[in-house]
Image (cartoon, rainbow, N blue to C red):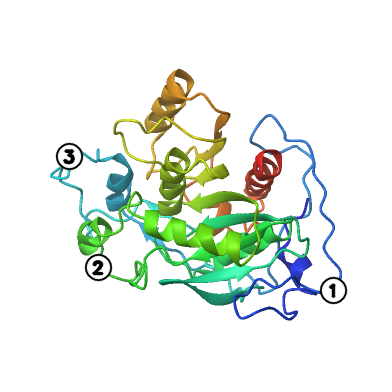
Amino acid sequence: MTLHPQHLRTTTRAARSEHGCRRNTGHPATVTVTAATSRAGPGSSLPPSARPSPSCKLQGVCLPLLLASFFTTPLDKPDVKTPMANEANPCPCDIGHKLEYGGMGQEVQVEHIKAYVTRSPVDAGKAVIVVQDIFGWQLPNTRYMADMIAGNGYTTIVPDFFVGQEPWDPAGDWSTFPEWIKSKNPRNINREVEAVMRYLTQQCHAQKIGIVGFCWGGAVVHHVMMTYPEIRAGVSVYGIIRESEGIYNLKNPTLFIFAENDPVIPLEQVSVLTQKLKEHCTVNHQVKTFTGQTHGFVHRKREDCSPADKPYIEEARRNLIEWLNKFI
């Protein structure tokens, strides 16, 4: 298994069609699979970490309690008041680092939306949709994760699920966040999902498709895995659909990854999800919480800058790949 997007460097600039899905030339990366570990913590044998070349540059991004309300307010109670961010109520969560990463893929047009596509060096007929967080499809961290997945034998695509609308600006006025997020319902993306599936099957010849998402994208994964049996496996990373009817009826295997110290998704909500899935879900699923970690740790923390967090970051990324390998 590789957790290193740079394995793609020798192939991703190879010739492609205008759709971005012509098979790469050059030597494919070696893909191996290791067994999953049973606990989320340090001490296990881990593969080499993904290490972007630029030196560490912390660019902290704060998530106020407004984002927490996005995941905890029931869909059938839109009038519930949300806390506001101001000087007296500072942001509780520093997501971490914004990577200085250019990417190994290319941007393409997929029907009515733009997308970032990385072709796997191994033409295995498998693809993974990678769904952005609130900071948009062009966030380098998300593209880094897509390239990591591509290095493990999947064509990956990061669509613009905001369909041309601006992503959230962390330097903006957080008091406007509730109004902004209203137009970003993670259950109102079916048109985009179906366009992406057509692209992957028709242009990239994908026969098996999975999906991975982070934060807002994790909620999208939850919705997609309840809606599309064509998607064979999903990994929702610190994302969840708020309490509403039928949210535990997953169509195919789904892994949920959470952080213990996440003010956005409290452990009580994770416990409810775990119990309800046990009661109602009939397909393979797993809910895994990582000790001592915070919201964003899988894709927003630089493990070479956060040595104490490195084992958790690596294990979560490895679990993600192993889930895809097992069920796609």
Residue that numbered label 1 is attached to = 26
User: With respect to residue 167, does 273 lie above or below?
Assistant: above
Please state which of the two labelled residues, at mark 2 or mark 1, is closer to the viewer.
1
Q: Alpha-carbon neighbours of circle 2 within 10 Å: few (<14), some, or many (≥20)?
A: few
Which secondary structure, mark 2? loop
Residue located farthest toward the front when viewing the structure as drawn: 202
Point out residue 142 in the picture as x, y percentages from the top left corner.
54, 62
Which mark is drawn over residue 44?
none
Which mark is drawn over residue 173?
2
**Residue type at the position of mark 2:** Asp
**Residue type at the position of mark 3:** Lys
Residue at image location 41% in from the left, 46% down from the top: 219
Point out residue 322 in the picture as x, y percentages from the top left corner.
70, 42
Q: Alpha-carbon neighbours of circle 1 within 10 Å: few (<14), some, or many (≥20)?
A: few
Residue at image location 75% in from the left, 55% down from the top: 124
Classify residue 305 by image quadrant. Answer: bottom right
N-terminal of the two: label 3 or label 2? 3
Residue that numbered label 3 is attached to = 77
Point out residue 248 in the picture as x, y percentages from the top left corner.
41, 30
Which secondary structure, mark 3? loop
Give the alpha-carbon distance from disc 3 to disc 2, as whole Å: 24 Å
Give the alpha-carbon distance from disc 2 to disc 1, as whole Å: 47 Å
Please state which of the two labelled residues, at mark 3 or mark 2, is closer to the viewer.
3
Residue located farthest toward the left when viewing the structure as drawn: 79
Point out residue 90 in the picture as x, y percentages from the top left corner.
29, 56
User: With respect to residue 4, does 65 lie above or below?
Assistant: above
Please state which of the two labelled residues, at mark 3 or mark 1, is closer to the viewer.
1
Asked if the residue under mark 1 is in contact with the one under mark 3, i.e. CB atoms within 8 Å, the reply is no
Closer to the camera in the image, 16 or 132: 16
- Left/right placement of residue 282 relative to residue 322 reads left
Query: Is residue 237 in view from this perspective?
Result: yes
Query: Is residue 97 in view from this perspective?
Result: no
